Image: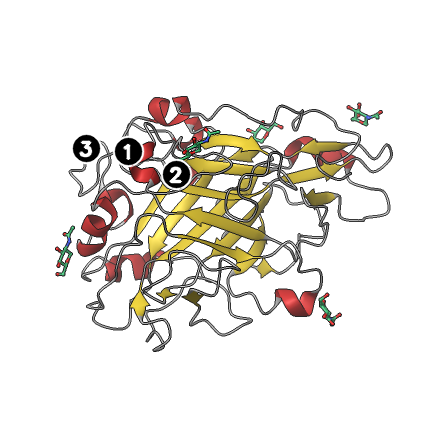
Amino acid sequence: MHRLPPLLLLQAASLSEAALRFGCATVSSQRLDPLVEPGQVPSAHVHQIVGGNAFNASMAGDIGEQATCTTCTYSEDFSNYWTAVLYFRHPTNGSYKRVPQYPNAQLGYEGRDARDIKGGMTIYYTERDFETDGDEYISAFKPGFRMTVGSPTITNLSDAQRQPGLRYTCLEDILTRSHETYELPARPCPAGIMAIHHFPTCWDGVNLDSPDHQSHMYNTKPPGDGGFLNVDKCPESHPVKVPQLAYETMWNTSMFADMWPADESQPFVWSFMDSKGYGTHADYVFGWKGDSLQRALNSSCMFHGCGSPGVQGVLKTQPIADMNKCAVENTVTEDTEGWLSELPGSR
Ligand SMILES: *[C@@H]1O[C@H](CO)[C@@H](O)[C@H](O)[C@H]1NC(C)=O
Ligand SMILES: *[C@@H]1O[C@H](CO)[C@@H](O)[C@H](O)[C@H]1NC(C)=O
Ligand SMILES: *[C@@H]1O[C@H](CO)[C@@H](O)[C@H](O)[C@H]1NC(C)=O
Ligand SMILES: *[C@@H]1O[C@H](CO)[C@@H](O)[C@H](O)[C@H]1NC(C)=O
Ligand SMILES: *[C@@H]1O[C@H](CO)[C@@H](O)[C@H](O)[C@H]1NC(C)=O
């Protein structure tokens, strides 16, 4: 089990490092991929994106200064975070229907019902440092920084096992946080499917990006291991310790519960036509305004304690209604939501 258990959370409260966990509503869902296919309209497959409204096919520069609103809880976070979209393939007629997303119930607190957040994802910036003294300095990412994890070109288990921290959890209920798999769950999951993406924590300190969008980063996690990283020594090639970014996306499969295939085959498929789930991947473009992320990382704040109504935190928050209001208009105008005879981009 790699989630943060409650006991460890208590211990962590005394350490000198911050751990951010917050919700971001959906800002856009369309076929754009500014990181891997910049400028291409439409891109190869559908993505679901959260964060600032500077998102577009060719975004560049400091989006923390370009965006004017964000779907994230922290109103200074104009970053963009995205993954592919999960579809359901109807077992008898072969049509596809997008699986809806739902917000993480743990994001609620007094006066704020997380269920009001429109879809989106849970975002973490953390490094698990429960055993050592917590004094490692963690640098924020720099304006223009971007990276990916995973790849839609991965099609078998042995390659998937080389990707640290990319997993699925079959949700028995909305709070299930154990039993992670490399492939999409092969059985109906009562509360849906959680897709988990952890990013590496060591940066080369020079390049804001790299040709494969990954080699400027280094993962201290051995292949096969999942989950959040403990604070580890970064290698000389990638000496700068950055926070570990992680996404959790909750896919609500309940509307398909009575359509499970008679032959027991797994009916869900990523928007890039992957029904195994080995090609799971995620993208990030940094966009915190000014020094706001560093300010939080320098503090010792924990989750809601980093800023929430009623809790004076180091970060500014905004009401859920304002998160949900921020949106990016689609530049690719095709149906991605109805029952579709084929996946967008599959031709
Ligand atoms: C996309 O954003 C960039 C800046 O990041 C801007 O220069 C460009 O004009 C935008 N493109 C569109 C089509 O809005
Ligand atoms: C396939 O089945 C779904 C669910 O009953 C239905 O909404 C959709 O229109 C069907 N597609 C076709 C092509 O008949
Ligand atoms: C997995 O896929 C890669 C790339 O297509 C291939 O090189 C490798 O041999 C495959 N491994 C197995 C065990 O099938
Ligand atoms: C999932 O979707 C169903 C409708 O199909 C809805 O009733 C339910 O509340 C949703 N679950 C969550 C956790 O949002
Ligand atoms: C964070 O801490 C470093 C090292 O102590 C300091 O140089 C920097 O000014 C701090 N940044 C912020 C935004 O607090």
Category of crowding for the residue at label 3, using alpha-carbon neighbours closer than 10 angstroms: few (below 14), some (14–19), many (at least 20): few
Where does label 3 land, which residue? 310
Residue type at mark 3: give it.
Gly
The image shows a total of numbered marks equal to 3
State the separation of the CA atoms marked 3 and 2. 17 Å
Task: Give coordinates of residue 331: x percent, y percent.
Answer: 55, 26
Q: Secondary structure at mark 1?
A: loop
Q: CA distance from mark 2 to mark 1?
A: 11 Å
Return the x and y of residue 234 as percentages of the image width and height.
34, 74
Q: Position of residue 59 (x, y in %)?
A: 44, 38
The residue wearing badge 1 is 75
Query: Which image quarter has ligand 4?
Result: top right
Relative placement, left or right, of 40 versus 308 is right
Which is nearer the eye, 252 or 315? 315
Q: CA distance from mark 1 to mark 3?
A: 16 Å
Q: Nearer the viewer, residue 138 or 55?
A: 55
**Can you identify the residue that label 2 sits on?**
23
Q: Is residue 273 above or below residue 7?
A: above
What amino acid is labelled 2 in the image? Gly
Asked whether the beta carbons under mark 3 and mark 2 sit within 8 Å of each other, the answer is no
